Amino acid sequence: MNQLSSLPPGTFSPVLQALADALGANTVLAGEQLLDRHREDWSGTPSHEPVGMVLPRTPEDVATVLRICHLHGAPVVVQGGLTGLAGGANVQKGELVMSMARLDRIELLDAAGGTAIVQAGVTLQALKEAAEAHALDFPLDLGARGSCQLGGNAATNAGGNRVLRFGMMRNLILGLEVALPDGTLLTMLDRVIKNNAGYDLKQLFIGSEGTLGVVTRLSLALAPRPGWTGTALCAVDDFQAALALLRAAKARLPGLAAFELMWRDFFDAGTAAIHAAPPFAEPAPLYVLIESFAGSREQGEAAFEHMLEHALSEGLVQDAVIAQSQAQAEQLWAIREGVSELLSQCKPCAAFDVSVPIERMDALVQDLRTRLEASFPTQSHLFFGHLGDGNLHLISGPFESEQALVDAEAAVYAAVGRFHGSISAEHGIGVVKRPFLHHSRSSAELQLMRQLKGLLDPKGILNAGRIFESSTPAED
């Protein structure tokens, strides 16, 4: 007996019954069996009641779900770790939820070759821990590492704290297996870096937010675990000093992994949110968090200290704190990663994740600060980001009305467009940024995106309405 049989008469739908018949008991849920945690991601955007939920256990199950939904014209939303901020995993009206949580196997970890094959529901933290046992690391690192899933990381082309050294998720993917909307299972699990045998089809699906296919398995590149990690927090006087410090760090630290910039407003709020004492006696306009790797402590410490001595002597840094232990390093990173606490304090708020050419970042911040403080003088506007890769974050709020929040979003994204940046650096478009995509993509680009969607998902069943408005039958 499957779980659908416990539902009241008349609640069965043909698609749910077909899924239960194909996948067996304990795979399809509906009604009161659905949990609140499956209803929405971290974006805080509205989510509808799903028509049901399916939890496939294998890639073949995922393909079966899509084949059945394609046959019935039933719209599906794919959910991973639900850590997104763009509303892409939230349920829209009439959608069936497909959770990837049960695809949680690490199928292969090749220590000699430095590769891993994992199922899409494996969390980032689980892979990092498995790699650590072999003196390896999966270099992607996010604050949501304990919850986010690797399939979702691929679908949104996740970035995080170490893009400066290792690149985006795209740079760490050797191959993918993807279930297409019609149920075709496309296996492209290459484990080699050099492969120019025709089109690199995996690139179609990385960053496509689950609109073209569902990632089921990934072939990933691992890196040697660093023998030494150095962490320092620096107080700097202005943005130009921070840029000069970035150039010095790039030149003098071969293992430079992270270069995080925090404006004073964010730094003060972040310190207070985690109930930490300010690490400096005097406040500074800007703070830079630096992380660098090396093969050994001797190599790493010498280069790290020499770079900071140079920065201090040149006046690029006014004061610095060097972590003397892993615990101290975590305390410094906690200030930068206290975003979840700030988001909860500022609700309802707008959380921006944009990118801009590095040399224009300060001008964009000044422009945004002037506009937002004039239009929303009672709200907080907190700036921080990854200076090394041009990724700027902004938390604004709390807003008294939904219209005020939308007006703030419109102002920010229009400014990003004027500065020739991207309205989404990491989390994708989802539904939150959909109305503003024209600030970063031309009409010709949008038309080609729609053509690709129509080619691979002609019935429009898969993550419909994400990235751009859907005109497919699934939303009619």
Image (spheres, rainbow, N blue to C red):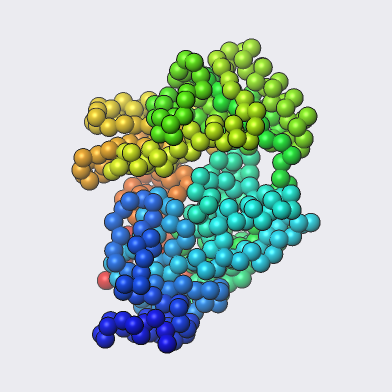
**Quadrant holding the N terminus:** bottom left
Q: Is residue 421 visible?
A: no
Number of numbered callouts drawn: 0
**Quadrant holding the C terminus:** bottom left
Q: Is residue 363 left or right of residue 405?
A: right
Q: Position of residue 201 (x, y in %)?
A: 58, 63
Query: In the picture shown, does residue 369 fall above or below 412?
Result: above
Q: Quadrant of residue 244?
A: top right
Q: Is residue 48 visible?
A: yes
Residue in the image at 74% along x and 49% along y: 135
Q: Position of residue 162 (x, y in %)?
A: 59, 41
Residue in the image at 62% along x and 25% along y: 322
Query: In the picture shown, does residue 189 fall above or below 400?
Result: below
Q: Quadrant of residue 401?
A: top left
Query: In the picture shown, does residue 407 fall above or below 360?
Result: below
Query: In the picture shown, does residue 18 fall above or below 153?
Result: below
Q: Position of residue 56 (x, y in %)?
A: 49, 74
Q: Position of residue 108 (x, y in %)?
A: 69, 64
**In the image shown, does 394 or 326 lie closer to the viewer?**
326
Q: Is residue 325 left or right of residue 377?
A: right
Residue in the image at 76% along x and 37% along y: 295
